[in-house]
Image (cartoon, rainbow, N blue to C red):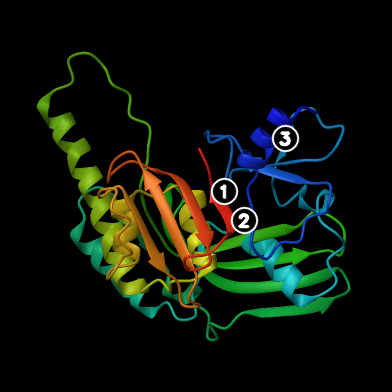
Amino acid sequence: MTTLAVLILSLSTLDVPGVAFREDVGITEGTRGLREAFPYLRAKRPGMARGEELTPENLHRFIPPVRDEKAAYAAVRLFVAGIAVEKGDALITVGEELRKEFQHLKPKVDRKASPADWSRRVERKADGWHVTFVAYEMDRLLQLVRIDAVVPESGPISMQRTPIVRGPMTSWQTAMINGQDDGFLRREKEMQAEARDARRRYAEALRMPRTLDAAFAIGRLRLSPAEVRSLWPGKQIDLARGLNHGGYILADGTVVSFAARTVQSPIHTLIHRKNKGPVLHRLTVR
């Protein structure tokens, strides 16, 4: 491999905090289409032409055997498009309010699905590690869900999502036909406004912590700078590059910095580093 090829590979390689991959595995940006799902990462080992999109079914081929609680939880968390929620009553209340207020994208709310105990549980059983927790997900659909997963020591992960609050959608396909009337276009704008309003109000109720886990989700979801500010309101680090570049100091004193073409366009780069120090993780690259 030439020096240039090594440099290009190193610049395109991504990091996955908390997940210990085998030493010969490289992680890069995956495909972002209708058939692919979070975290939109591709894993590659020597001898593989293109690598494989990471899924719960194939992760075991790229990581060592899962032999402890921490590794089991990290393996499941990798496929959760958001963050773990320790208490979701405020999100449920917002979902009920939006259901009454929205005209088009009404969320579905099932209070009976909310757990009596919101704490994370990881237990070792005969068929593997049983992992249960509640998460707020933001990939194409905003939802509060209970995650129930089984992580074998070495084998496909099974995951089940039980919605507590489901919706609204934040993206959808629209068939544009010549001659659409003003009513159709007005409805489309109203739906987009409802999706933005829901994201903002869930964020206010969530009070998303400034943690590396949250930064990983933000980067892999490629949220816009405006959406990041709704999740992490308050002081940013001034990078003196305009409104589409910014950064935040995390709870542990480290820093994440991001860049996007505009305030409303998806983040194309998100880096985690020590404060005024070296890069620790590359979470999203062009």
Of the pair 281 and 195, the residue shown nearer to us: 281
Instruction: Pick whichever of labels 3 and 1 is earlier in the sequence.
Output: 3
Name the residue beneath numbered marker 3. Answer: 6
Please tell me how crowded label 1 is: few (under 14), some (14-19), or many (20+) other residues with Cα within 10 Å: many
> Cβ–Cβ below 8 Å for labels 2 and 3?
no
Determine if residue 145 is in view: no
Say if residue 167 shows up in the picture.
yes
Tag shown at residue 79: 2
Residue type (three-letter) at the residue carrying disc 1: Phe
From the viewer's side, name the closer residue of 161 and 195: 195
Question: Around disc 2, counting alpha carbons within 10 Å, would you say few (fewer than 14), some (14 to 19), or many (20 or more)?
Answer: some
Instruction: Report the residue at 61% width, 38% height from top.
Output: 30
Q: Which amino acid, mark 3?
A: Val
Quarter holding the N terminus? top right
Left or right of 173? Residue 58 is right
Residue for badge 1:
38
Residue at figure coordinates x 75%, y 35% from the top left:
51
Distance (Cα) linking label 2 and label 3: 29 Å
- Circle 2: element type: loop
> CA separation, marks 3 and 1?
27 Å
Q: From what the image shows, is residue 88 above or below residue 276?
A: below
Q: Residue furthest left?
A: 182
